[in-house]
Amino acid sequence: MSQPFYLTTAISYVNAKPHVGHAYEFIVSDAICRYRRMQGRPVFFLSGVDEHSATVEKAAEEAGQHPRDYCDYMAEVFLNLHRLTGSSLSDFIRTSEPRHHDTTKELLRRAYAKGDIYKGHYEGWYCFSCEAFYLADDLLDGELCPVHKKKAEWRQEENYFFRLSRYAEAIKRHFEEHPDFNVPVMYRNEMLALLDRGLQDISISRSTTRWGITLPWDESNVSYVWFDALSNYLTGVGFLKDEALFNTYWPADVHVIGKDINRFHSVLWPAMLMSCDIALPKMVLVHGFVYHKGEKMSKTIGNIVDPVSLIEQYGRDPLRYFLLREIAFGQDGNYSEDALINRYNADLANDLGNLFSRVLAMIKKYREQRVPRTAGIDGAFQEVISKIRRAYVESMEQYAPHLALGAVWDLVSKANDYVQKQEPWALAKDPNKKDDLDRVLLNLAEALRAVAVMIHPFMPGTSEEMLKRLGFPLDGGFPLLKDLEHAGLCAGNTIDVGASLFPRIDKTK
């Protein structure tokens, strides 16, 4: 069997409804998982929600609800966004589930038994929104949190601590021995700088809140959010519950996370796993923020972009395409409605949509809806397709979906050029050019098949529709990359012209 692949998103805080940044993480994670399935690999794709924290408790109080009722509602909100964005999830984990309580308590027991957890007193700068302490050097001027730009508060508290400092050298060695553990490289360098400054022990419990998982040895304290939250990646693949599932998929191949929580995933999480004698994940893959017209999205500013309304207005695949093409993975990206519409009209409606309609219309008109069978295939054009396929695979293996989409659109552009140069409408007028017309139409159908397969990770609905009209119905399955190694598979297929894939958007309306 092909090598199994396990990918997780960060689990989402339920203290507020999701914005387009959440949608981006779900979409890019789904694109990676779909690509792996196209390689024939068994894939486990996990996401979920983080329900235990003082922040969530406060949000529930403000909503006039018990935390349980509040979390039940918000979990469905996030799960619905996964459905709307097309996430091909294997499981959706909630940290309030009994199976997760068991995981968290077991990790706490193991670390405590090893002497890595102790009771102590802590003073430091604390951000309520991050639920994290910061060193003074990490804060911005005015004691502002570097993530939320809110003033941190000085806290003094007695609770339990995890001996993170004990694992500093072991984590450094892991970074040295596994250069692809934390990528892209700019985020790896940040973590190396953090390790060089030295690690402090970290608080792993709270006595001021009851909404959480109590410590096995002291029920007056509940587990601190990160020790609770990070262990979800184990729960989701059967830790303690399903040995066969766990042994198949752990260690995780990829944790996809935002840059603001990199240090917890690339430093704290490895230390926790080392303490508990559990194998470390293979990669922490970090993406940047999605800004709205150059500004960080904020309820205070009032510039939150609701992904649900975008999908309702423009469709799922156009939003997926825009975010994956517009944002260079790892870097911060920018959303604006004008940019989305421009991408839609130029790339989807004009380039791809018109090419697809035009080619299928010519097959219908000149060859009674059947892709011609011909002994003469254009070797040079097929080599173009093969070269672009190799660039596409290389980009996806480097977790650069924006570059992979760029390669696909290079093929779309070359196919449009091929139409103009070969002029099939002129060939159709000359009976002596019958074989030439057959060859051109088959090659164009093959180019469209290649495009339809390669866009599947990014625009699964469009991919399925294109393949169906070309005579390759997926019936809910996944196209296989290996099929692109064979030329001429479209020959003899009956096509269905159908409606326009992407009707042009009138910006004036």
Image: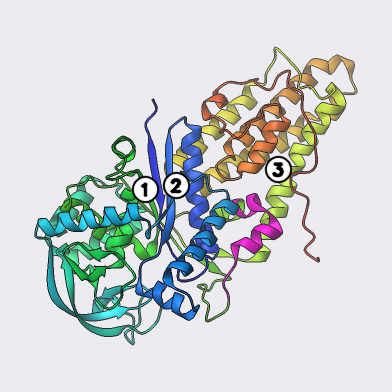
- Residue 481: which numbered mark, if any? none
Q: Which residue is mark 1?
A: 236
Q: Which residue is mark 2?
A: 91
Three-letter amino acid code at the position of disc 1: Gly
Q: Nearer the viewer, residue 217 or 239?
A: 217
Which residues are the magenta region? 303-320
Q: Nearer the viewer, residue 468 or 249?
A: 249
309 w.r.t. 494: above or below: below
180 w.r.t. 24: above or below: above
Figure quadrant of residue 128: bottom left
* Quadrant where the image shows the C terminus: bottom right
Q: How many marks?
A: 3
Q: Which residue is mark 3?
A: 352
Query: Which residue ends up furthest to the bottom in the rendered image?
Result: 142
Figure quadrant of residue 310: bottom right
- The crowding category of the residue bearing disc 2, from other C-alpha atoms within 10 Å (few below 14, some 14 to 19, many at least 20), is some
Do the numbered discs 2 and 1 sit on residues whose CB atoms are within 8 Å?
yes
Dominant secondary structure, magenta: helix
- The crowding category of the residue bearing disc 1, from other C-alpha atoms within 10 Å (few below 14, some 14 to 19, many at least 20), is many
316 w.r.t. 139: above or below: above
State which mark lies toward you, 1 or 3.
Answer: 1
* Cα distance between the residues tagged 1 and 3: 39 Å
* Quadrant where the image shows the N terminus: top left
